[in-house]
Image (tube, grey):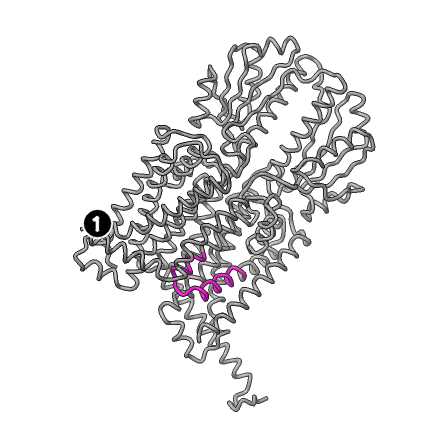
């Protein structure tokens, strides 16, 4: 079969030379990566470093919370009460002797909460009168304050139980909550934060890798040089995408291995689904970087934009740490534009719950749409820039 | 000397702001982010979707469920007819939790026995799960108090009266929004300075600058001032928005706040210039800025407390200027901390700034390529 444009070359050969050109481009890109180690640093060093730092650094599990306990009149009752606090790994009780001292400690931040047992505590207790226990928590960090007051309540209920048992009666509570936490029974925050972190790190790496590399070629004028060769635009884009996709997947594999073996996050889904979802997401992130670099004229703008539209939104709007359902509706709608949102949902499900298709399929579909849009728009804009 | 510094500063400002896109990325995103993040970054739960599996048809269970439904923290999304559907609805994330009430619930309560309510909750996000359980427990505690009162029984011998200081309604926005001031100021200041020397190195104009009569100290000052003014302006706008738009109480002294802000911006400039003078290309400069910014944000106590980190990381955060500024921001805004209680936050930032600026100035001359 001959084509009619008059070149007279068989399509087969054209395809073959196309493949050859592409191979040449990919090879050139790999050589460039090897010679300027900063891309390798982005792809491999960064995930390891970031995951290591964040895996240990980002934790919402408050343990050994310093709690000041003020006892105005120490006796048996109060020491039993304190006992229920000192046995727990959640508390680090600090005995204080007066309220002014406790207030000072709370203000200076040396304790996060103060529990105040008044002078008449055991008198009221033994007379079966109401014995109020004053609790003050430092509310500046509202999340920690809530968790700490939950812990204190737990210790109080435990103490009530012991007291009732000692008196030979059952603790009479009308309704008792029996909690069953699925997927993460110890409520270890690391189990959901690490999959989320992987999504954020991959957003960074994917977008940074392409954004910087392309912007550099534009700035140095080597892109124009490439354009005047017989290489097609599609081939230039593919030639950029393939090497950085490979690098990014390497970084991803490294992150998953670290999650499983270093941080003991269970992987309940299948590796294949994980691989497929990661490829989709990486394509989206690379597409995003590509678009940024084409729209931005120079590395300064490209880099700024890559940081501003990737890292911070992925950190705050992806549901990685802040619950999306609790955000105001306009912002909930906005989160649909954040690719990391879908990947966070997929990763948290694959790691902790398994291959739940109804969750994975919808989010994967969103990623397919986003990557198509990013890559498609990049291709169009790419053509325009030449003029 | 000052004329030369002035000329250099003007030139730096021009280099930064002449380009429309550069101007845009310096000023617009921080403000948009302040608005979006200010509303988005909250740990307070609203409208947690829950499903009910009620096998009991007594009045007690109805009353308890009415309390769950009435809370603004929870929204009922489904009623489940049998146990088999629990796993599906949780797996698909349609409901975060299922409240299961057994057939004996109301009967037990009326007999004076304990009725148990089972809560099956999705732990994929353990923080959300823990907070939702805390909210549920509060509702159940209130129910219990009412039930005891109505049935005339004796309550528990002691009870807790909990109050939160500095943030009585425990709104996490009060914690996060002051933190955003530090976060955005850091990002802008570091980015503006981190690329300033690298850009000139890449274009070869830095050598030209070095052979002019301008001394390295003057280059240092000339390169610092644009970042300083932009950082300070940006911080001021965000502080105003925090007070007047988000209505976060500013209980302390504005001067104390600005002492902290100025020292913080200086330390950020120091780090930015140091990265810039180490980098040969802009890509390296940007990568350096990145490798500093990302950990600096996450290890600052902005969202997750430093106290929860393992000891070696807690020590590492001592090198992070944002860590100190976070304490100052929250201390001045919410606690109204006076100047003298924050001195321990001021001097480390000053040290970080001076050390980095010194090294950067030295590197200007000694690292040519």
**A193 inside magenta stretch:** no
Residue B281, image quadrant:
bottom left
Q: Is residue B209 left or right of residue A108?
A: left
Q: Nearer the viewer, residue B122 or B167?
A: B167
Q: In this view, does B127 lie to the left or right of B104?
A: left
Q: Picture coordinates of residue B96 (x, y %)?
A: 67, 42
The N terminus of chain A, quarter of image: bottom right
Find the residue positioned furthest to the left: B213
**Magenta segment boundaries in residue numbering:** A284-306
Residue B14 vs B335, above or below: the answer is below
Residue B46 vs A89, above or below: the answer is below
Which residue position is annotated with label 1?
B217
Residue A272, image quadrant:
bottom right
Q: Is residue A147 visible?
A: no
Q: Picture coordinates of residue B70 (x, y %)?
A: 70, 35
Q: Which of B3 and A266 is in front in this view?
A: B3
Q: Can residue A355 be seen in this view?
A: yes
Residue B270 vs A128, above or below: the answer is below
Q: What secondary structure predominates along the stretch shown in magenta?
A: helix
């Amino acid at each position: 079969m001959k084509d009619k444009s008059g070149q007279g070359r068989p399509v087969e050969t054209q395809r073959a030379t196309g493949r050859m050109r592409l191979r040449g481009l990919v090879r050139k890109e790999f050589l460039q990566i090897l010679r300027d180690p900063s891309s390798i640093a982005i792809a491999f060093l960064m995930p390891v470093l970031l995951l290591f730092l964040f895996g240990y650094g980002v934790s919402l599990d408050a343990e050994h919370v310093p709690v000041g306990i003020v006892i105005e009149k120490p006796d048996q009752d109060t020491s039993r009460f304190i006992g229920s606090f000192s046995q727990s790994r959640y508390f680090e009780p600090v005995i204080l002797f007066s309220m002014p001292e406790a207030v000072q400690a709370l203000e200076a931040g040396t304790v996060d909460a103060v529990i105040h047992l008044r002078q008449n505590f055991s008198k009221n207790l033994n007379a079966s009168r109401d014995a109020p226990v004053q609790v003050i928590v430092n509310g500046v960090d509202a999340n920690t304050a809530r968790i700490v007051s939950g812990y204190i309540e737990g210790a109080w209920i435990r103490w009530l139980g012991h007291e009732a048992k000692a008196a030979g009666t059952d603790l009479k509570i009308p309704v008792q909550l029996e909690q069953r936490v699925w997927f993460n029974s110890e409520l270890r925050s690391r189990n959901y934060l690490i999959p989320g972190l992987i999504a954020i790190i991959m957003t960074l790496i994917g977008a940074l890798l392409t954004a910087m590399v392309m912007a550099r070629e534009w700035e140095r004028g080597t892109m124009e040089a490439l354009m005047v060769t017989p290489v097609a635009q599609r081939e230039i884009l593919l030639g950029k995408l393939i090497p950085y996709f490979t690098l990014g997947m390497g970084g991803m594999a490294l992150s998953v291995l670290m999650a499983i073996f270093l941080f003991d996050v269970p992987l309940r889904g299948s590796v294949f689904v994980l691989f497929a979802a990661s490829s989709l997401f990486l394509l989206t992130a690379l597409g995003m970087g590509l678009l940024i670099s084409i729209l931005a004229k120079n590395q300064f703008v490209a880099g700024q934009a890559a940081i501003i539209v990737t890292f911070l939104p992925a950190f705050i709007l992806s549901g990685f740490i802040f619950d999306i359902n609790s955000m105001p509706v306009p912002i909930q709608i906005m989160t649909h534009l954040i690719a990391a949102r879908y990947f966070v949902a997929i990763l948290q499900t694959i790691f902790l719950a398994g291959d739940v298709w109804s969750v994975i399929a919808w989010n994967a579909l969103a990623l397919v749409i986003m990557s198509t849009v990013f890559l498609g728009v990049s291709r169009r804009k790419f053509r325009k820039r030449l003029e | 000397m000052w004329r030369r510094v002035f000329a250099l500063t003007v030139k730096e400002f021009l280099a930064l702001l002449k380009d429309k896109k550069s101007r845009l990325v310096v000023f617009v995103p921080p403000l948009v982010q302040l608005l979006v993040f200010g509303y988005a970054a909250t740990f307070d739960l609203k409208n947690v979707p829950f499903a009910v599996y009620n096998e009991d048809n007594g009045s007690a269970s109805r009353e308890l469920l009415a309390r769950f439904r009435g809370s603004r923290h929870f929204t009922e999304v489904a009623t489940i007819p049998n146990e088999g559907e629990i796993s599906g609805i949780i797996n698909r994330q349609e409901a975060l939790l299922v409240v299961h009430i057994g057939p004996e619930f109301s009967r037990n309560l009326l007999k004076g026995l304990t009725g148990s309510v089972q809560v099956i909750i999705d732990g994929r996000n353990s923080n959300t799960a823990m907070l939702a359980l805390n909210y549920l427990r509060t509702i159940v505690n209130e129910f219990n108090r009412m039930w005891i009162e109505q049935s005339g029984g004796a309550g528990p011998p002691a009870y807790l009266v909990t109050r939160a200081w500095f943030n009585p309604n425990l709104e996490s926005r009060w914690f996060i929004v002051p933190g955003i001031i530090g976060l955005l100021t850091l990002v802008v200041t570091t980015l503006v300075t981190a690329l300033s020397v690298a850009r000139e190195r890449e274009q070869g104009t830095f050598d030209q600058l070095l052979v002019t009569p301008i001394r390295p100290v003057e280059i240092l000052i000339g390169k610092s001032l644009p970042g300083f003014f932009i950082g300070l302006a940006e911080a001021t706008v965000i502080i105003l928005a925090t007070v007047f738009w988000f209505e976060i109480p500013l209980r302390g002294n504005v001067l104390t706040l600005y002492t902290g802000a100025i020292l913080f911006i200086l330390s950020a400039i120091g780090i930015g210039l140091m990265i810039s003078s180490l980098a040969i290309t802009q890509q390296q400069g940007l990568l350096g800025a990145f490798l500093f910014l990302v950990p600096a944000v996450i290890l600052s106590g902005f969202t997750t407390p430093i106290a929860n980190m393992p000891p070696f990381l807690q020590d590492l955060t001592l090198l992070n200027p944002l860590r100190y500024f976070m304490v100052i921001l929250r201390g001045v805004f919410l606690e109204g901390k006076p100047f003298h209680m924050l001195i321990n936050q001021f001097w480390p930032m000053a040290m970080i700034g001076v050390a980095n600026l010194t090294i950067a100035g030295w590197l200007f001359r000694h690292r040519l390529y």
